[in-house]
Structures are given as structure tokens and as C-alpha cells.
Image (spheres, grey):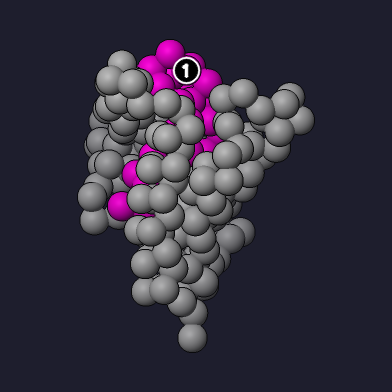
Amino acid sequence: MKDIILGASHITDLSGLDHILFLIALAASFDLTKLGRMALLATAFTLGHSLTLLLAGLDVVRSLIVYVEFLIPLTIVITAALQISGVSLVTSTKFAKKSIYLFTVLFGLIHGLGFSSFYRISTSGDSSFIVPLLKFNLGIEIGQLVILLVTLSLFSLGRSLGIHERSQQLVVGGATLSLALIMVIENWPI
């Protein structure tokens, strides 16, 4: 149970705002009626994140944290910029939708690198880290679903008040882009 709680707290921790911002940027063109598709995107993110943690647990991957802490907000910048540019993650072509899932997995890999050092230390010397990893990832999924339910509920409320998808994309994309750019500047590798 502690691994599930650790996973959920990892994704919902406000001091690690990057995961929350990424999910909000990713969800900018969605509402509750598209919860299933958004949950699939969140799962794609978790798959990438999980793969990185698995490789870290096997001591295959080691990251230079200075670059990872720069790349993580950069993934948010890219996602938010796509929303601002008008790319609809809801109504895109079949090829674009597949590309979005691929990029989401890739961005999950990058975000996973940010936690991989801690994860490697916490599992070092423990050959049975697979079950705790699965529980941790279940916690991440639960945390992401909570974030998405709150976010998409707010977006649905906005739609019921007459806010159009495009306006939502611009406002949410602009806000997450602004916050992520600050994070990029703060973490610029020198």
C-alpha cells in the first residue's frame, strides 16, 4: 500500500508541479465527455515513466539531473505550444493521434528520468523491485485520474458556461506555457 500512496503523492505533490502542469497542458482541448481518451493519454505517459523507472531499477539508466530538470518543463512547453497552435488532441487525424500517443510516451520517459535517481537509490540492493514498481505506477495512475477528474470537471463547467474548446486551448495552453517557460529558465543547464 505504501508504494501506491508514494506513486499517487509523487504525481499530485504541488512541490513537483511539473506532472500536474503536463497533464493540464495535455488536457487543454478535452472535457469530461472525453475522459476515456484523456485517460489513455495519461496511461501512455505512465508507460513511458514506468519504463524509465524499470531501467533505473535495473541500473541500466542513469541521468544527468541538470539536463533532465531542464527537459521536463520543456515537454510542458511543447505540449502547451501545440495547444496554442490549435492542434486538437481530440479531433486530430488518425496519424496525428498516434503521434500524440508516441510523444506522450516519450515525454513520460523524460519525466521518469526526474524520479529515477531517487527510485534507483530506494530500490538498490533489492532484486524484487518489480512488484513495488507496479504498485507505484498504480498510484501514479490513480493520482493522474484524480487530477484529470478535477481538471476536466472544471473544463466541462467552463463549456457549460459557454467557453469554447478553442478559447480553452488558448487560455490553458498560455497559462501552462508561461509557467513552464519560467521553469525552463530556472533549470537552464549552464
| Viewer can see residue 81 | yes
- Taking the view exactly as shown, the residue that stands out farthest to the right is 95
Q: How many marks?
A: 1
Provide the secondary structure element on which disc 1 rests: helix
Which one is in front, 14 or 3? Answer: 14
- Taking the view exactly as shown, the residue that stands out farthest to the top is 33
Rendered view: 157 above or below 85: above
Indicate the quadrant where residue 161 lies: top left
Q: Position of residue 52 (x, y in %)?
A: 55, 50
Q: Position of residue 91 (x, y in %)?
A: 62, 23
In the image, is 58 to the left or to the right of 97? left
Q: Is residue 36 magenta?
A: yes
Which one is in front, 168 or 73? Answer: 168
Rendered view: 67 above or below 32: below
Indicate the quadrant where residue 179 lies: bottom left
Looking at the image, which residue is at 29% across and 37% down?
Answer: 8
Tag 1 residue: 34
- Magenta span covers which residues? 17-45
Looking at the image, which residue is at 58% across and 46% down?
Answer: 85
Which one is in front, 156 or 118? Answer: 156
Q: Is residue 81 magenta?
A: no
Rendered view: 176 above or below 6: below
